[in-house]
Each structure stands twice: as structure tokens, then as C-alpha cells.
Amino acid sequence: MQLNINGQTHEVDADADTPLLWVLRDNLGMTGTKFGCGLAQCGACSVLVDGQVTRSCVTTVDMLEGTEITTIEAIEQDDVGARVVEKWVEHQVPQCGYCQSGQVMAATALLKEVAQPTEEDVRAAMINLCRCGTYNYIKAAIDDLSGRKGEPL
Amino acid sequence: MTQRPDSPLKKRFSFAGIALIILAGGGWFVTRLPSSPFDGAAPQATPDLIARGEYVARQADCVACHSLEDGAPFAGGLEMGTPLGSIFATNITPDPQTGIGTYTLADFDRALRHGVTPDRRRLYPAMPYPSYEKMSDDDISALYAFFMNDVTPVQQAAAQSDIPWPLNIRWPLALWNVVFTTGQTYQTDPDQSEQWNRGAYLVEGAGHCGSCHTPRGMAMNEQGLDSSDPDFLSGALLDGWFAPSLRGDGAAGIGRWSEDDLFAFLSQGRNDHAVVFGSMTEAFNNSLQFMTDDDLRAISVYLKSLPGQGPGWQAQPATVTSLVEAAQSGLPGAETYMANCAACHGRDGLGQNEWIPALAGATSSQGTEPASQINVTLNGSGRVVADGMPDSYRMPPYRDRLNDTQIAEVLQFVRSSWGNTGTPVDTDAVADLRMRTDPASVAPIVLQMR
């Protein structure tokens, strides 16, 4: 089976029902995408499939042939992704960092869909869980990216 | 000639006499032991027969009621709520004091196919003898051989029913049996194939599918016990789950499923349309998956022959496909769906092949009874174990993440999107099931069919 990941074609030897997350981490060694809950609940495993944020822990590889998959490893090759990472650094968003690759994917997907999301859009789209509680910093960074200057944290 | 009228005294005596005869006859009738073809027969117990009996026990799913989750197999104890009060499944291990150790083959047959114990008590039809009566003599003697020789005896007395007097008098059930059972083993339909007849035998008999899937009447009787009745397997609500129609109904039945789809569902617990959930999880884990491919194929052929009603589901494109659209559209439930459900079930509601069930077109997304969808959203799905392997993906419980209004709205969104035609979901219905599926509440649902 062939998967197009970050612009490269990878030949993958995996059963049809293998989750994309296992193929990324175990077969291809791309460990930037994290395993969180395994139930599509927390968002740590988020990747982009044709630009839509997708939980890789419950997405089987047989559904992904012919799609373009983007992972955190290549997010800075995308203009929007690069801006997100820049602001993430500027606002010092991460604490432990485990959930942050998923957070960056979610933020990138949102900003690619609407360049200037409202606060309501942000609340609707940024549903990934963060056990360190960096939500206020995430909101500040996205407000910044949306052209709103919030209170500095 | 003069006609001399009977004296009033004599008349009174003759009335009393007739009444006495009726009473005596009735008394004999309701307390009699029905005859069994095994009366006086010597039971057999060859290894082949015992093995066949074990298979019949799988078909009949005896453990579903006669075992507790952490208890010894067949030792009984499961509490079942009835409108009259609770009853408890009995110990059917061959223990002589508390189980069925002293039963003869004929006693065993009478309990199984006629609902009568050796001490002439009538069983409540929670024991599905109206279905089991269709089982063949051969299967009954095999089942007896298995229970007597291959089940470990366990000394454990069954708890007593809390149904109050006079409702706990059992003999009227003999009259119930006259009205609601046929007293006949399965009669082969010569116009149908051998395979169809095998499927009918399993579904109407040992499989007792109608116990859950057939609606019940005023007297708790199943409205229809075989394929000739249009109510048979037409769907019923019990224990907070709606057991859907197994007939060819376009939207609310399995009309859209092919025979192969049905076979996959019965043998693997999943297909492109659905994954077993609710009470069906246990029926699959303990019973269906152990049946042979030939038998499951026969069941599929038989079920596909049951005619249904109504047009099939017609797919419609999604009106909302992203979280931002959902937030902006203001459609109730749309945002909750995109945030909590879409990652697995898809923005298009089509799920992921056989791994995660579609909600678009799903049987549970149609019709007037949303209990199954409310229940599975609150409490998640059970573990499906196929060929010894637990499933990878399971519906998580949303009890603590979504409130009653959110659940009602998101289900309403599901039931009115993508061509689904289900009725709206009432917030009160969610609150009610939330309470009744909470074991710590004051009124939990007693029976969890296993």
C-alpha cells in the first residue's frame, strides 16, 4: 500500500485495519505525532488529511490511499503552519509539550479554513485536551494569528 | 303428561356438581405434568452427544440469563424486572440440592419446552419456553447430556422472587400456555429450502431472537412466534435498548443489508452498516460467534426472507462538514457532533468501513424510538470479543462530558442529517435514561440482558 505523507510517497507494509498512527510511529519512525487516548477523544494524534484535521489513532490506513497526509514533522513547510509554530514559540505556549503537536495541527487546520476565526470559531475548533492547562496560551497565540491582540499573559 | 320441575334443592346440587367437576378438572389441568416423549427413557451420554449439547447451549445462549458476570457458569442469580416484581434466574448446574441434579431427561424436557418444573410449578415465560418448545427431541437430549455430564455442579440457591401474593400464584400460567404457545416442535415448511428451514428452526427455536426483537402484548406474550406473523421480529423496546426490526423494513429494519452483510454481522459482530452494541454485544460474545458458518448462513437466508415495510434510506449530503461551519450555522447539535463525534463517525456520518459504524442510514438513526442511541451515547458500547480478540475501537461513554440537552441536540442532529428520518429526541428522555442506567440511582434498570 502506498501512502502520501508530507509530499513523499511511502510504501507501507501494514494490514488494512492498522491505524495510521501505528504506521507513522512504528513503521515510518515519525514519532512527532503522539498517542494519547486511542479513542479519538484527546486530539494528541491529530494529523491533516487533505487539509482536514483527523484523529490518526482511529483512522485505518485503507481509507487513506490517494489522500495527502500532513504530519507535525512537515507543518513548517506550510505557510500557515509555519506562522502557527512561530507564534507558538513567541507566546511560549507549550509546558510539557506532549499534546502540542496535535494542538498545532488543529490550529493550522482552523486557520487554513478561516483566515480570521472569531472567538467562537476558536472555541469550536480547539477541542484538543491539554493536561498542563495551556489553554489560555493557546487562545492568546491564535488571537494573535487572527489579528486580535488580547491581554498579554 | 305432566312435567315435574326439578326441585330447587336438586338444581342446586347439580350446579355444584358441575362446578366441582370443572374445578377438579381445571385443578388437575393447571397442576399436571405434561407428557414428555422422554418419559421413562434412559438418557445417553456419549462424547459426541455431550459436544453437540454444548453447541445447543451456545445456540440457546443459556448463560445469558443463568450466569452472573463474575459467577460460575450456569449457577444462576440474574435478577430480572417484570411488571409484577423481580424474579431471579435459577441454578441450572447439576447440583442435586440447588440445581437440576435430580432432574430426569423427561423433567428437563418439561422445564425447557413446557415451562413446568418436576414439582409441577409453572415457570414464568421469562424462560423462553414458548421458543424452546420448537427444539427437536435430539437437541433436547443432547443438551441434557451436556448439562448433566460437562457442567460443574455449583451449590448456590436461587434468590426468591419478590412478587407479592396473590400475583405470585403460578398455576394460571398453565392457562397462559394454552393461549400463547403451540406445544409443538418446529414444523418443517415443505415449500422452503432445507437451509431456510434450518435458519427458521434456529431463530424461532433455540436462538429465541424474538424474546428481545418481537414486541410483547398485554400479557407479556410475544406477538408472533414464527415467520407467518408480521409482528414477529418487528422490533421492541426493552431494558433501555431498542432491539430493532430484523425484517426487511427499508429504513428501520435490515432491508438494506445483503445476505453477506448479515452473515458478516452474525459471525464477526460487524459489517459496513453496523457493529453490535447494547444487549446484542453479549448475544454475539457468548452465542452467535460460536455457531457454525452453515448455521449462520442459514439464519441469514431465513431473516432475509422476512418481508418488511417502508422505503429504504436515501443518502443526502451533509449540510455541515467542519467545526467552524457548525459553529457558524447555529444548527442545534451540529457543533457538538463535529467536536465529539465526527473524528470517528465522520463529517459525512459514514463511519469507517466495518470498524466504526455509520450513523447515516443506521437503523438506530431512524424511527420513533431513540433509546438505543441515547443509551450508547451516555454509557458507551460494550467490549466486542471476536475470535478471542477484543475490539480496537469502542464507543466511549459521554455521561460525564455532555449534559442532557447536548445529548438530545446532538442525537437530533444525527437523526435529521444525511437523509436519516428518526424522530426528535426529548431532553427528558435523556435525563430519564441517565438516571435509570446509573446503578447508584434510586430506580436503575434491573435486567441487563447478557
Image: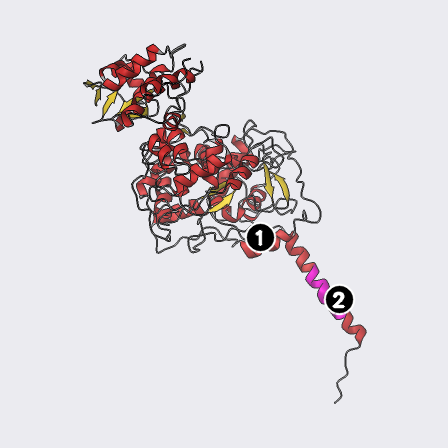
User: Mark 2 — on which chain does it sit?
Assistant: B
Q: Which residue is mark 2?
A: B16
Q: What is the span of residues highlighted in magenta in the rendered image?
A: B13-23
**Amino acid on which disc 2 is placed:** Ala
**Amino acid on which disc 1 is placed:** Ala
**Secondary element type, mark 2:** helix
Of A141 and B351, the residue lying toward us: A141
Q: Residue at x 42, y 17 (%)?
A: A136
Mark 2 on the same chain as mark 1? yes
Residue B59 in sight? no
Residue A107 position, x and y percent, is 33, 21
Please tell me whether residue A151 is drawn above or below residue A54 in the rendered image. above
User: Mark 1 — on which chain does it sit?
Assistant: B
Q: Which mark is residue B219?
A: 1
Assign the magenta stretch its main secondary structure. Answer: helix
Residue B357 position, x and y percent, is 36, 35
Quarter of image, res A18: top left
Of B101 and B309, the residue lying toward us: B309
Residue B419 position, x and y percent, is 33, 44
Q: Residue at x 32, y 21 (%)?
A: A147
As for residue B411 lying within the magenta part, the answer is no
